[in-house]
Amino acid sequence: MILVDADACPVKDEIYTVAYRHKLPVLLYAATYLRHPDHPLISMTMAGDAFDAADDLIAEAAAPGTLVITADLPLADRALKAGAEVLTHRGEALTAANIGGKLATRDLMADLRGGLEGQALGGPRPFSRADRSAFAQALERAARRLAP
């Protein structure tokens, strides 16, 4: 089963393609309705606009044998603690071994941004074709492990 933090996920089409190939159910979670294929493997849960509502639902559903797709590091940490595998939309596998350092870096950057109000620090690099390809390859590997 693939759980998707879908609000800002740029790789939904790749997820659908792999899900069809491996017959893996996909559950999309978003604040409001998102268009998605009308297919028995694809379902959508509207979490509402409460802060972290979709994240909370994904974390509750995460378990061994599930794959969570998210760029949200606190959600990734919760999913990993529940036994799920986690991939970012750039194809990076988040694990118990690397999530701590990523969360620490995130917190440090948030502190720096807070102390440098009005100064541009930039953000994540633009999503590229190489990122999309890396994600598709990582998802395919994960799906082979999860497929029945």
Image (spheres, rainbow, N blue to C red):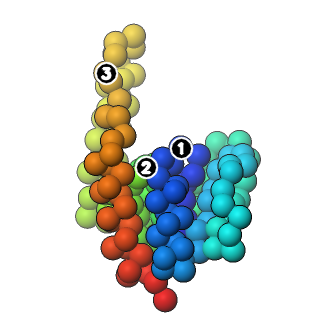
In the visual, does 6 lie left or right of 104? right
Q: Residue 44: image x %, image y %?
A: 69, 60
Q: Residue 30: image x %, image y %?
A: 65, 50
Q: Report the Cα–Cα distance between label 1 and label 3.
A: 21 Å
The reply to whether residue 15 is visible in this rendering is yes
Residue shown at the point (62%, 59%) measured from the top left: 28
Q: How many marks?
A: 3
Callout 2–callout 1 Cβ contact below 8 Å = yes
Q: Report the Cα–Cα distance between label 3 and label 2.
A: 19 Å
Residue shown at the point (71%, 64%) measured from the top left: 38
Disc assigned to residue 8: 1
Label 2 element class: loop
Residue shown at the point (58%, 62%) measured from the top left: 58
Q: Earlier in the sequence, mark 2 or mark 1?
A: 1
Residue shown at the point (68%, 49%) measured from the top left: 34
**Furthest-top residue in this view:** 118
**Furthest-bottom residue in this view:** 148
Q: What kind of residue is marked 2?
A: Ala
Label 3 element class: loop
Q: What kind of residue is marked 1?
A: Ala
- Look at mark 3 in the image and give the residue it sits on: 121
Q: Quadrant of residue 1?
A: bottom right
Label 1 element class: loop
Q: Report the Cα–Cα distance between label 2 and label 1.
A: 9 Å
Using the image as rendered, state which of residue 99 and residue 87 is in the foreground. Answer: 87
Using the image as rendered, state which of residue 108 and residue 93 is in the foreground. Answer: 93
In the visual, does 108 lie left or right of 37? left
Q: Earlier in the sequence, mark 1 or mark 3?
A: 1
Q: Is residue 51 above or below residue 121?
A: below
Disc assigned to residue 71: 2
